[in-house]
Amino acid sequence: MASPTLPRRGGSIVIVATALLSGLAAGALSCLLALMIKRDPSWLMLPFAFAIGVFVQWQGYRGARSAFAAAGAMLICLVYAQYLYAAVRMADTLGFPLRDTLFKMDFSLVWQMIQANFSAWDALTFVLTPLLAAGVAAKSPLRTQR
């Protein structure tokens, strides 16, 4: 007979690592997909928010912990995708290799590039996607009966 309580899933360090790594991976993947299909990465963020919420829930986190982890991962995803996309724009504009641009670009230049290309849709994305990820992660999963 299965136990009704879930096993402990680790402490704060584990959940922070989960949020950090899933956010960075999703940010890089969304930027690569946006470059592949030649679209702005912000429209890809809604499916990624849903996927991050499901991933955090799949990891076994429930309730407020899962909501905070998913929202944090989504914010990391958004910031990292904007950073990568700014580096791509800079490298494309100046004709430099992307690898060199990523390692030589300073934060103030990245910030100016993000501000120049930040739209109302991007602002809406920064508000809605962490909420969506948190909502998906915090909801109780559907259980199959055996």
Image (tube, rainbow, N blue to C red):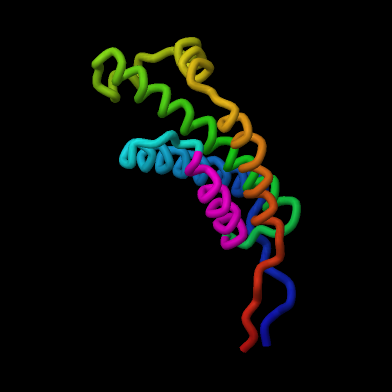
Left or right, 82 with respect to 95, comes to right
**Quadrant including the N terminus:** bottom right
Left or right, 88 with respect to 125, comes to left
Seen at 49% across and 15% down, the residue is: 116
Q: Nearer the viewer, residue 99 or 126?
A: 126
Quarter of image, res 56 = bottom right
Q: Position of residue 87 (x, y in %)?
A: 38, 22
Q: Nearer the viewer, residue 4 or 38?
A: 38
In the displayed image of the protein, which residue is found farthest to the front? Answer: 120
Q: Position of residue 15 (x, y in %)?
A: 62, 48
State how many labels appear: 0
Seen at 67% across and 53% down, the residue is: 66
Measured along the vertical axis of the image, is residue 18 above or below residue 86?
below
Q: Position of residue 55 (x, y in %)?
A: 55, 57
Majority secondary structure of the magenta segment? Answer: helix
Measured along the vertical axis of the image, is residue 26 above or below residue 137?
above
Measured along the vertical axis of the image, is residue 113 above or below residue 45?
above
Q: Position of residue 84 (x, y in %)?
A: 41, 28
Q: Nearer the viewer, residue 124 or 76?
A: 124
The magenta segment is 43-58
Measured along the vertical axis of the image, is residue 134 above or below residue 117?
below
Seen at 29% across and 24% down, the residue is: 98
Quarter of image, res 141 = bottom right
Q: Is residue 63 magenta?
A: no
Left or right, 92 with respect to 27, comes to left
Seen at 69% across and 45% down, the residue is: 68
**Quadrant including the C terminus:** bottom right
